[in-house]
Image (cartoon, rainbow, N blue to C red):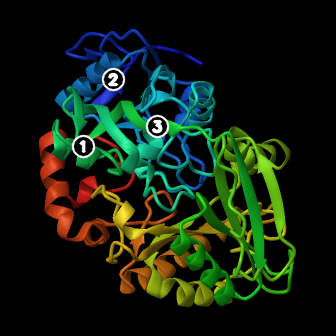
Amino acid sequence: MTQLPLFWDPSSRDWTTEAGGGALALPEVEGEFHFDGEAVTEASRDLGRIVTRRPAAVLRPRTAADVAKVIRFCHDNQIQVAPQGTGHMTQGQRLVEGGIAIDVTSLNTVHECGPTTADVDGGVLWSDLVSALAGHGTRFTGGLTGYLPITVGGTLSAGGIGPGYRYGAQIDSVSRVQVVTGRGEIEWASETELPDLFDAVLGGVGQVGVITRAELKVAPVPTGTRSWVLPYVEPGAAFRAMREVVARGQVDEIYCIIAPPGAIAPVPTFLVHLAHYEYEGEPTPEGLLDGLDPQGPVQEERLDYVDLCEKYSLMMHQWRIDDGWDDRHKPWFDIFLADEHIEAFSAETFALMTDEDWSLPDGKGFVLVFPHRAGSFRRPRLRMPEQEPDGLIWLFDVLNASSGGAAPDYVEKMLERNKAWMEKVRRLGGKAYPIGGQQYGPEEWREHYGDTWDDVVRAKKLYDPARILTPGPGINAAVP
């Protein structure tokens, strides 16, 4: 382990440990640079364990000014740079080869928890923020992802999908963001301040800037929750029940975990999860489950709001401890489909799925579906299928992980599977949720953004003219 500082040699366009000869030193920062060791190893991979790209250095900033200095240096010298949170993506989206990785988890201050807004750094973990907000009697209005130890900036860059079907994505409950653009400038953006930057950065996969701070909308925290799990073995019955729950609008959360054949029944079992938030003097109404006709015993639970939010994070944390889950390959498949296609696509996909697709026998994977009101999605970079505002859009996730005895060609087979499934999704007008194992080229990205592609290009040229930011997804290569 050398820990020698790096210098950039503009003539060779490469790094050197030798000062002098025209080599440029990295800018001085309040934080710290790492040039080898665990910091660089961790920055070279993500949750998928499929793609490896090694940066030349990792910056752990103390301030947004640190981020700005380093990005300005990279802009001036055309060095690629990528912001990184906890790496909860699976196809190298956060990685950069030979450039600089910015570990935003060191920006982790909760600045203020007010009655309607929380002001937090981009590197704050949602797991910490949920508890901090609850301590002030509030909760984030935009819904929470199932796994909470991930950064605010990371989910706001991806979109952030939770079980709150009325809220849209997490990016739909953001008031303002502080962004360090690809030119190294610190800007605040909202619907009235630099609205083009606001649109471009939320759900923008890190293409125009690094989210260093955010003002999030909050509401009173429930005094408790009541939740149920309703099992179904007939897919049509499960989807009818979920549509009915959304139409009634009485519960606060809905999502479905599909258990593999053999786990509960000979066929895939749909476990529909519902939750209702309770407030002082407002008990849960009776009859919420009337007419839903579950096809097995219903599980019911009363939990504190924070405990409900952390329920599956704790389960996955145990997987990480007991089963080496972090190091398993995770070729996730994550897409959005309009309501008219979800049942047929699910049936066709489940008919094709093998034990490897179901993460059997010990891969610790699962399948998820989330219904959402189409009109609740308002930010343009998170792409959605065409749908009437009152209609439903479904997130469909095959979150499989390799088993202990996975075949040597497991990753190759799964990525080919994802490609074939994605081609079908595109024919149906669906869209990728860009956290999964999708290998997109320029043509696919242009199609993905559709009639908003010109806006993507315009923002990229304005806010990242050197095209240095977040090369992992491959969007840079699609920009003319």
Residue depicted at 34% across the width and 72% down the height: 389
Tags 1 and 3 touching, CB below 8 Å? no
Eye-nearest disc, 1 or 3 = 3
| Label 1 – label 2 distance at C-alpha | 19 Å
Which percent across, then down, holds residue 468?
Answer: 26, 40
Please give the residue where the numbered disc 1 appears in the rendered image. Answer: 198
Residue 215 x, y percent position in the rendering: 37, 32
Mark pair 1, 3: CA separation: 19 Å
Left or right, residue 426 beside residue 398: left
Residue at 69% x, 51% y is: 283
Q: Of the residues under marks 1 and 3, which one precedes in the sequence?
A: 1
**Picture layout, residue 365 above or below residue 225:** below
Say whether disc 1 or disc 2 marks the residue closer to the N-terminus: 2
Residue identifier under label 3:
218
- Residue 307: % across, % down: 73, 41
**Between disc 2 and disc 3, whose residue precedes?**
2
Question: Is residue 77 shown to the viewer in this render?
Answer: yes
Q: Amino acid at mark 2?
A: Val
Q: For mark 2, what is the residue? A: 67
